[in-house]
Image (cartoon, grey):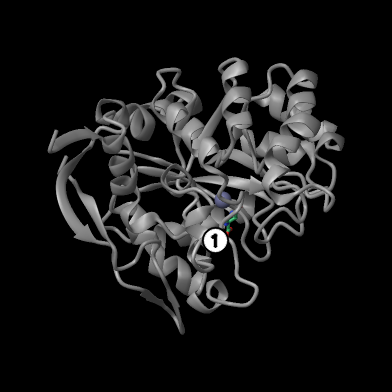
Amino acid sequence: MNELTIRQPDDWHLHLRDGAMLDAVAGFSARQCGRAIIMPNLVPPVTTVAEANAYRDRVLAAVGPAHDFQPLMTLYLTDQTTAAEIEQAANDPHIHAVKLYPAGATTNSENGVTDPLAIDSVLGALERTGLPLLVHGEVVDPAVDIFDREAVFIERVLSPMLERYPELKVVMEHITTAQAVAFVRSQGDRLGATITAHHLMFNRNAMLAGGIRPHYYCLPILKREKHREALLEAAVDPSGKFFMGTDSAPHPKGAKESACGCAGAFTAPVAVELYAQVFDQLGALDRLEAFTSLNGPRFYGLPVNERRLKLERRSQTVPAPVSAGDDTVVPFLSGESIDWTATLLDE
Ligand code: DOR
Ligand code: ZN
């Protein structure tokens, strides 16, 4: 297959940041995706309905009128989040989920939740209202090896949480392990998962063998090959429980290429092409549309996009670094050749 046309994808996990960075990166996602779940880990974080709506206005301003792109907003849970805020979020047309960062797990998570099993009134309100809980599924216990943090999170936090709240709707974000794939499959339809393009493409050797490559450093960290293989099987499986979430996470070049580099891969400029390359290599291009464009809307109870996106087997060079105010941001695989080119078709 050298060409295929699919329904326009959505990105169910995206970091757009704020200010000059937001202005620099928003258009890349809007050129491909109809909607995106916008992560709230700004500094300070987006913790209230009012802040989420103000941020939505800034996202729309950065995208501009040329693109028909809907930012689906989220709230950042803290130890102080109230059930009343959740009720208000559930009634707001622009808020589609809340995000649980275990405090200290990743970029700008310092204000996250210290004990995810202790926020009972919030979890109860989520279960009651049906607003999805998006989890960064890693424990922060320093005694747990960084490569095991996701699997331990499932045992210590996610599994007991789902037992305690049988109707709670959860997305396990950016899964990276065979344990996560098996756990998601073992649960009913109220548990889904997103998978990034970079976790489908690479194992930890890409980051560490032959030199340390900071642009491959993200959280959860890349794992060994057998876990990548499990993710590939999940992405193409017909369960409908796995969907596209890029976790595209831009950082200034200097913050990535540093003695203590930030976690995050800025994949948005060629996100859909990267997924197409993975599915093509698996001989599973016929499964791509379900993953990028159908499973996510079904989970979130939203209609699929009406527009179509054309993918052609035509190589392109991943864009050069982009300026963002006084900074530069380097796209993941910048300067390298990839096999596919995506074009959004007119309505
Ligand atoms: O690699 C990551 N980058 N993982 C996250 O969980 C957060 C993200 C970011 O905001 O930079
Ligand atoms: Zn993320």
* Tag 1: amino acid: Leu
> Viewer-proximal residue, 8 or 259?
259
Position above or below: 41 against 88: below
Query: Horizontal placement of 10 versus 256: left or right?
Result: left
Residue 20 spot, x, y in % from top left: 46, 74
Query: Horizontal placement of 318 versus 130: left or right?
Result: left
Q: Quadrant of the C terminus?
A: top left
Residue 180 spot, x, y in % from top left: 61, 31
Residue wearing tag 1: 208
Residue at image coords 77%, 29%? 155
Among the 4 quarters of the image, the one containing residue 224: top right
Query: Horizontal placement of 22 versus 67: left or right?
Result: right
- Is residue 296 in view? no
Residue 248 spot, x, y in % from top left: 46, 54
- Give the residue at the far bottom of this rendering: 326
Residue at image coords 57%, 46%? 223
Position above or below: 101 against 9: below
Residue 294 spot, x, y in % from top left: 36, 27
